[in-house]
Image (cartoon, rainbow, N blue to C red):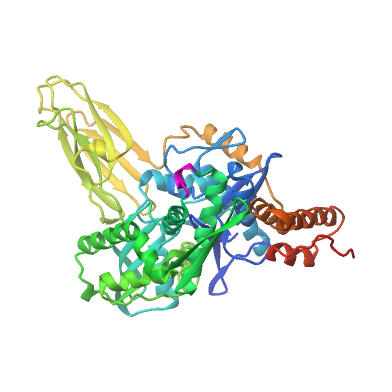
């Protein structure tokens, strides 16, 4: 059974497999390798994932969810048809579709995957990533950081004898920056930084808000459906500006067409807050890696949002070095995940390749703050950018007379006060009651390359020991709870592949219908009615496919 690599993205996801000495992208029913990370559940409980679900963002916005990657590992909930889903649930639905497409393409069962994760994801977010894999029926022992995966693919397919790269991974919803050193068959990650809530969709929002402002529309007061219509048009305008210096945004609005002329120069101006946030992780990773731009041979742009000329121009402007692309920005992370899966399987050609990684956030425990007893300090044991695997220890003494217990909350983050960081675990251990400072505990952190943290606490006087494995969030405390949730998600019937193309066309037609009016709307309704008649007794009609996609359907269709 093959192990596949998966790039689970905010906007699109795709899978890759190592085959015959190279990577192959896994296509869907239509031959496309990019699957939109969108989920919709209809009134009959049928699960739509990908292109068919993306069309539902306008026709059925209340039953359709996208951009949930940003909220993995949080308490965010989504209500669809009265049922509640977490970002991990929704991510699992996307992974299930990729798994099914892979099994059809490869002709064999797929039970294991290497899944990419933003380098700046914390422990909870990484645990959520693995949990989504489990929900989808995929064994997910390994996560690979997205820029690390890109660097791995670059070194395998475009080898350099010895070089230092700055990898900027700017995707739909996240930004990761990594400083990478490559030599022989070693890819050594020196430093990482990022912003888990910054991506290409922030340009969509900036364009949409500017459009509304110019057309005297209150963006905040828009209904979910109207907002999705404006955002979809904003995304199309952003894509057009990738090809052209200027573009015209059009939105059908109450029987009239509203427009906005936008240039690349204007986009830079209206999206200036996005660019300001973009620069901060770059500055931080260079500082943490103790590197100057003169030390860096190449700046590699990764992720779909890096295809925007304004992003390339900005990087060139602030870093004074022209960035380059190695492979396709849309697919190179998936390629790297596929290579990493092959490394894990010890495949010929890559079995001697070594990818190192580092701890993206500092790890420590909360300790007593004598200057402000109400606010505990963060005592760091493993600092950010420490090479993995790592093991660090610290000794902590009692702070009260005859104290009988030591409480050790475990945190992840960079802030001085523990409460300002992310709590990832709690651990308590009994100690002999003595005068304060007379008893102590030794705390050891062991953090592995998969982001699993093992905490060991030993009482110095008695030798009593307690251990905790921090490998997931606390949403599912028991194996039984986890198995029950897996069965609940499996009960949702995913659309069969042979019906997927038809459903995409139906949802596209419904989306067009909701945006148009008058005679154009009637033509879409007529085409949709005719299409339903056709598929009820025969296969897909190719002529209708072209007509619906192009929005040129006619009132009376010729019958075969």
Q: Is residue 60 left or right of residue 220?
A: right
Q: Which contiguous range is marked in magenta?
A: 217-221
Residue 12 highlighted magenta (yes or no): no
Which percent across, then down, holds residue 361?
29, 50
- Residue 174: x and y in percent read 40, 56
Above or below 499: residue 248: below
Residue at 26% in and 56% down: 385
Of all residues, the one furthest to the bottom in this rendering is 161
How many marks the image carries: the answer is 0
> Which of the 4 quarters of the picture holds residue 164?
bottom left
Give the left or right position of residue 50, taking residue 183 as reference: right
Q: Which of these two is toward me, 346 or 427?
A: 427
Q: Quadrant of the N terminus?
A: bottom right
Q: Is residue 79 left or right of residue 204?
A: right
Principal secondary structure, stretch drawn in magenta: helix
Q: What percent of the width, then of the height, locates residue 28?
A: 64, 62
The quadrant the C terminus occupies is: bottom right
Please name the residue shown 34% across and 51% down the image.
448
Please tell me which residue is depicted at 52% across the width and 61% down the height of the picture: 259
- Above or below, 281 against 393 in this view is below
Which quarter of the picture shows residue 245? bottom left
Q: Is residue 353 visible?
A: no
Corner quadrant of residue 502: bottom right
Residue 204 can be seen, yes or no: yes
Q: x, y (%) of residue 284?
A: 24, 59
């Amino acid at each position: 059974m093959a192990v596949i690599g998966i790039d689970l993205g905010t906007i699109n996801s795709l899978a890759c497999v190592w085959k015959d000495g190279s990577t192959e992208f896994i296509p869907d029913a239509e031959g496309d390798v990019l699957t939109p990370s969108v989920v919709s559940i209809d009134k009959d409980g049928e699960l739509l994932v990908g292109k068919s679900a993306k069309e539902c963002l306008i026709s059925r916005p209340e039953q359709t969810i996208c951009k949930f990657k940003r909220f993995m590992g949080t308490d965010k909930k989504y209500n669809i048809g009265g049922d509640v889903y977490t970002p991990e649930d929704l991510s699992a639905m996307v992974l299930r579709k990729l798994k099914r497409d892979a099994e059809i393409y490869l002709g064999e069962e797929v039970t294991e995957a290497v899944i990419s994760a933003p380098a700046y994801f914390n422990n909870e977010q990484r645990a959520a990533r693995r949990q989504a894999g489990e929900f989808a029926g995929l064994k997910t022992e390994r996560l690979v950081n997205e820029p690390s995966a890109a660097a791995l693919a670059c070194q395998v397919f475009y080898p350099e004898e010895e070089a230092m790269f700055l990898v900027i991974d700017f995707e739909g919803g996240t930004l990761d920056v990594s400083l990478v050193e490559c030599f022989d068959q070693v890819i050594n990650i020196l430093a990482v930084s990022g912003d888990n809530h910054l991506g290409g969709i922030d340009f969509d929002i900036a364009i949409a808000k500017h459009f509304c402002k110019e057309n005297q529309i209150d963006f905040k007061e828009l209904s979910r459906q109207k907002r999705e219509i404006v955002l979809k048009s904003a995304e199309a305008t952003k894509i057009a500006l990738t090809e052209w210096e200027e573009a015209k945004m059009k939105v059908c609005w109450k029987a009239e067409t509203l427009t906005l002329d936008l240039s690349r120069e204007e986009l830079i101006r209206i999206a200036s807050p996005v660019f300001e946030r973009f620069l901060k992780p770059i500055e931080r990773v260079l500082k943490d890696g103790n590197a100057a731009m003169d030390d860096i041979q190449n700046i590699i742009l990764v992720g779909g949002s890096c295809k925007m000329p304004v992003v390339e121009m900005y990087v060139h402007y602030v870093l004074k070095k022209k960035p380059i692309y190695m492979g396709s920005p849309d697919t190179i992370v998936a390629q790297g995940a596929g290579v990493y899966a092959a490394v894990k399987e010890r495949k010929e050609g890559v079995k001697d390749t070594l990818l190192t990684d580092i701890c993206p956030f500092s790890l420590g425990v909360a300790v007593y703050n004598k200057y402000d007893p109400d606010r505990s300090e963060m005592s760091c044991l493993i600092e950010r950018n420490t090479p993995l695997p790592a093991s660090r220890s610290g000794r902590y003494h009692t702070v009260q007379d005859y104290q009988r217990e030591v409480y050790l909350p475990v945190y992840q983050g960079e802030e001085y006060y523990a409460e300002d960081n992310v709590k990832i675990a709690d651990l308590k251990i009994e100690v002999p009651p003595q005068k304060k400072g007379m008893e102590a505990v030794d705390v050891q952190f062991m953090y592995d390359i998969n982001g699993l943290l093992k905490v060991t606490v030993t009482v110095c006087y008695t030798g009593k020991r307690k251990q905790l494995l921090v490998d997931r969030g606390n949403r599912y405390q028991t194996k039984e709870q986890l198995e029950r949730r897996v069965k609940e998600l499996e009960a949702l019937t995913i659309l069969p592949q042979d019906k997927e193309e038809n459903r995409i066309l139906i949802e596209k037609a419904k989306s067009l219908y909701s945006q148009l009016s008058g005679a154009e709307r009637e033509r879409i309704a007529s085409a949709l009615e005719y299409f339903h008649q056709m598929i009820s007794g025969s296969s897909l009609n190719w002529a209708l496919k072209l007509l619906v996609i192009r929005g040129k359907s006619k009132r009376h269709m010729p019958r075969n």
